[in-house]
Image (cartoon, helix red, strand yellow):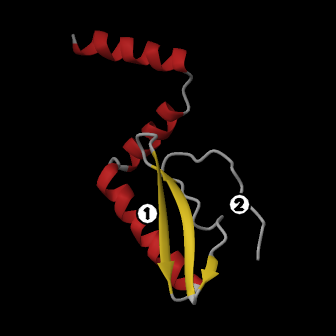
Amino acid sequence: MNTRRATNAKLEPGEHTIDRGNPRERNGTWRLDWSLRLYDGTVVRHTTTGADVSVVRRRARTKAEQLLAASGPTSARLHALAAEVAALSPQQRSELERLVGDLIS
């Protein structure tokens, strides 16, 4: 049994743990538990199974791409902006919200 743990480093928006995780085999089926941080900062957790490790990782990557496409911004600039906003401190975010509110008022 492999007892090594994957890193617990914080995920950035659009990042996943598919390549960090260690698939496990049980009764001939491989299983991978993985996480994905959506562009809005939400972390979703999934489990993917398959006949071998390559199938499991391929299925997991496909699912991650689907989740990101369904939940994320569509332009490269919006992706970059989402990453910048996610990195702001709470004080910076509240200042940004105030400024945006002033602009649209």
Q: Quadrant of residue 30?
A: bottom right
Q: Whole-percent x and y of residue 32? A: 56, 71
What is the three-letter code of the residue carrying label 2?
Answer: Ala
Residue 89 can be seen in this image: yes
Task: Judge from the rendering whether residue 81 lies leftward or rightward of residue 69; answer left or right.
Answer: right
The residue beneath circle 1 is 64
Dot 2: few (<14), some (14–19), or many (≥20) neighbours within 10 Å?
few
* Residue at (53, 54) in percent of width and height: 15
* Figure quadrant of the C terminus: top left
Task: Judge from the rendering whether residue 80 lies leftward or rightward of residue 26; answer left or right.
Answer: left
What is the three-letter code of the residue carrying label 1?
Answer: Ala
Residue contact between numbered discs 1 and 2, judged by CB atoms under 8 Å: no
Q: Whole-percent x and y of residue 71? A: 32, 50
10 relative to 35, above or below: above
* Residue at (43, 48) in percent of width and height: 38
Residue 74 can be seen in this image: no
Q: Whole-percent x and y of residue 40? A: 40, 40
Of residue 40 and residue 5, the one placed in the foreground of this image is 5
What is the number of the mark on residue 6? 2
Of residue 102 and residue 44, the one placed in the foreground of this image is 44
* Residue at (30, 9) in percent of width and height: 102
Mark 2: secondary structure: loop
